[in-house]
Amino acid sequence: MHEEGEPAVWRESRIRRMEEVRAHPVAELLECPAPVELLLSGMAHCFQYRAGEVVFHQSESCRGLYLVISGRLLRRAEWGQTSVALAPVRAGELLELAAFLSDGTHNFTLTAETAASVLLLPSDALSLAFQNFPPLRMRLLEELAREVSRAYFNSCLSRPLRLRGGCSAN
């Protein structure tokens, strides 16, 4: 048994599942033939934000994918009268895969907590890249699936484990 009462086999299984859905490095996700890389880098825009500045608002149209270069940012989502702080964002994170690959609308507001640099890969550049190199879209869809799996797995970790017969493992 693990020191908190969790059997070792469960702990090993949990660790293996987390490894399967870990985020892939951005360089790996965006790896493309040289002409496509030049297209993306040539059309990318780097923006600087001061602490407290909003990068984008929930429900606004998504302009592309956002790569955090430096700083710390906060995600906040509003549902009716409720405002929820979501996970913080740090350098190296690629944001808005869901918004870009689906309805094109931001699902949260992103605000700089500290001075931050964010690289925007614009929608039109990404669309051209998809036309010239279709595997790029599939890589991003796969990463979105891993992102959803990580979120689901993390939400499960925050709930007590219920065993058959109504017993709780915690």
Image (cartoon, rainbow, N blue to C red):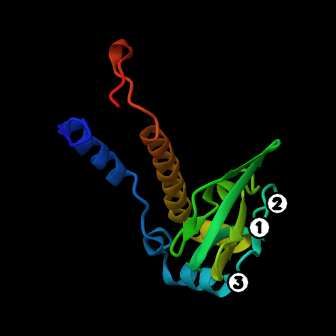
Amino acid type shown at disc 2: Glu
Instruction: Name the residue rendered at 36%, 24% in the picture.
Output: 168
Mark 1 or mark 3, earlier in chain? 3
Quarter-wise, where is residue 169 in the image? Answer: top left
Residue 39 seen in this snapshot: yes
Tags 1 and 2 touching, CB below 8 Å = yes
Q: Is residue 10 above or below residue 65?
A: above
Residue 107 seen in this snapshot: no
Amino acid type shown at disc 3: Phe
Q: How far apart are marks 1 and 3 (CA)?
A: 12 Å
Instruction: Name the residue rendered at 62%, 54% in the picture.
Output: 86
Amino acid type shown at disc 1: Phe
Which dot marks residue 107? Answer: none
Mark 3 or mark 2, earlier in chain? 3
Instruction: Name the residue rendered at 82%, 43% in the picture.
Output: 81
Q: Would you call the spot at circle 2 few (<14 residues within 10 Å), some (14-19), or many (20 or more)?
A: few
**91 left or right, relative to 57:** left
The kind of secondary structure element at disc 2 is loop
Quadrant of the drawing holding the N terminus: top left
Q: Name the residue under label 2.
A: 60
Q: Name the residue under label 3.
A: 47
Q: Nearer the viewer, residue 43 or 47?
A: 47
Q: Distance between the residues labelled 3 and 2?
A: 18 Å
Percent x, y of residue 12? 23, 44
Q: Mark 1 points at which residue?
A: 56
